[in-house]
Image (cartoon, helix red, strand yellow):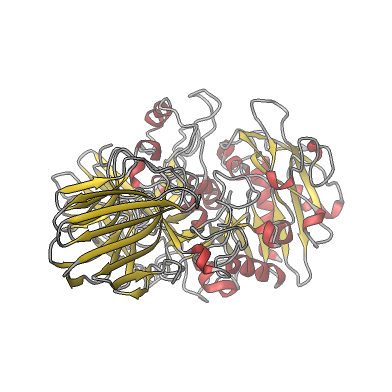
Amino acid sequence: MKNIPLIGYSDKLSLRPGETISFKVSSTLKKSFSASLKRSISADPNPKGIGIVEKDASKYFKTSSFKSREQSFNPGSYAISEKPIKVSVKKNLNFSIIIFPTLFSSKKQTILAFDNVEIYINSKGSSAIRVGDKSIFIKEPLILRTWYKINVKISLSGKVSISQKSLKNKNEKILINNGKISLKKIISSKISLAANVSREKIFNHFNGKIESPIINIDGKKIGEWDLSKNTSSTFVNSIKGPKLLLKNFPTRAVTGSKWDSSEMNWQHKPEHYAAIHFHEDDIYDFEWKTDFKFTIPKNMPSGIYVMRISCEDYEDAMIFFVAPAIGKTKTKICVLISTFTYAIYGNHARVDYKDSWLNRIKEWEAYPYNPVNYKKYGLSTYNYHSDGAGICHASHRRPLFNLRPGYITLVTNGSSNSSCSGLRHFQADSHLISWLHNKDFEYEIITDEQLHQDGFKAIKKYKTVITGSHPEYHTKETLDALREFRDNGGSLNYLGGNGFYWRIAIHKENKSLLEIRRPEGGIRAWASEPGEAYNAFDGTYGGLWRRSGRAPQELVGIGFTAQGNFYGHPYERKCFDKKFDWVFEGIKDNKIGDFGFSGNGAAGFELDHIDSHLTSLKDITLLAQSKASKDPKENFILVPESQLTHLSNIKHLPEEEILQADMVYFEVTGGGSVFSTGSITFCGSLPWNKFNNNVSKLLENIINKSIKR
């Protein structure tokens, strides 16, 4: 796969006035590229809607040119010693290391490299030792996903031996091969694990777990590392020798050779978690050099901004989000931008992608690149590593294709004439942003990152907080802040589906790096390995917030219940109590949202419903409801955490009474209120018919009420 001619990313997604953002660009083009600033209003390229709408923001950043240069990136995680080890060998050099290989390859896979000595897996899947340009290997290949201890002995006289012992079966014989290889007397080199690092080149990446590397010279231990130490860090302190620096964030808090299922939490029995899982395709920070910077002026309005770069016939767009200074809010409305969810889905290569989608992309002049065709740029936590392990880390410090205006997530309904835009996340949320502009609602934005960092004070002064279509991933801090806002008189408006669902952890040393574990239930792209449910970054139990006693129903009255294909349907009004007539003011039809740019209906794809077993909230009013379609092509299913058997579910009700979107409203002690739509496609109906429709009117009623409370 070729590199994209012009592409970039920024070091930050979230900023406030006075803060500086750095833009990093790679251009294979000869001419300089220009950079210009826009404010994003709509990111939907659908010509049947309002299209991509951006306002000139050159008053804050003057259009400028910068010299093109190509910047490289190096996928693959590994460990390298902070300092070289200098030794003089008088008799022999010995190594021992424990491995758990997870992928065979036509290429070498380095397990350990030290000077001109390399322990590796060859193309035949056998363990081998190389000294200089000579090597020997054990003929019998390794078995994948099996623990082995490998020992290597090299004498100054030229004798060498390599042995391997399966730790799975104690009765298995030790396999040994002997040979003759000359060894250097003086060695001065850094040690590397899971890759060979030579003259700044990194190659021969290993896929699998590594544990307990030890180096002995002349009977004296010069290097030993317990990889269970500093689990939440990007380095490992040594027992003997220099500390190891971890590059490209390999997976930690994984089971080791001693794990026997007696403990599931790595913090309680670290000796059972003394391994690190390396992958040849780990990449979360490209570490490109900065091409230009921009400091947010004090007079720059809060909003979504696009730094557009162009050169010759190519262009790219880097999104960032500007919030007001804390305590300097000027509006009653705050839009919560789901940057955690955007990053977690970053570069999601969908399994249903087809090359025929390119026809839609060309027809609409949409964003041209898709992660399926550019996997080396790093995939999302909805994808797998090359060895089959689920990707559990995410970061925005690399180009994210699906964080571009005009990016189409999926092409649905089989027709190029379909009115469905096929958008998710940032682009789908722009339906809400464009609606706010159309209705002249003044608003400011706060991102998940800022809410996590600053808590309740970030949103304290607003009358109402509005979410986008899919606020799925959260931390304890963001949930606490939203609940405090609600319970202190704020109006919380949840305009999506499958929200507040997964728990994530944030790396303490690199705030842009997120971690997700997927144990037990949940609609999930992969399942965590047994014993690997606890986050490495903060030690918390990963997975669904529901499993940690914080179901979304407790915050917003409803929670995820059903998923289907990307189809939408209307709601039916269910509440005719006169005290709620204000919600439906100006709406004559009881059928609401039988249209839309997301699935062609306001209730679809992922649905939330009321569940009294998962909330202590009272007096939740069901305003409207949409039953999931029984059409097989729409394929709606109950979420796994609610399914007990093929005949029963956790609520002991017929599935048709659960597979539904519930639109609700309730108030809490303290004066706060919550409006929840229960559907991921709700916002897609807002721009329909140039914003003149009953979904738009209903939300207008809700927001007007909330800012007047």
In front here: 259 or 607?
Answer: 259
Image-based side of 207 in relation to 155, left or right: right
In front here: 307 or 194?
Answer: 194
Which residue extends farthest right?
577
In front here: 80 or 124?
Answer: 124
From the image, which quarter does the C terminus lie in?
A: bottom right
In front here: 603 or 130?
Answer: 130
The image shows residue 213, relative to residue 41, as above or below, that is below
Work out whether residue 447 can be spotted: no
From the image, which quarter does the N terminus lie in?
A: top left
Residue at point 50%, 63% (across, down): 273
Number of numbered discs present?
A: 0
**Residue 692 location in percent, x, y?**
61, 40
**Residue 93 location in percent, x, y?**
23, 64
Residue at point 33%, 66% (across, down): 214
Occupied quadrant, residue 29: top left
Image-based side of 395 in relation to 267, left or right: left
**Residue 335 location in percent, x, y?**
55, 59
Occupied quadrant, residue 241: bottom left
Occupied quadrant, residue 535: bottom right
Work out whether residue 289 can be spotted: yes
Image-based side of 652 in relation to 254, left or right: right
**Residue 659 location in percent, x, y?**
74, 39
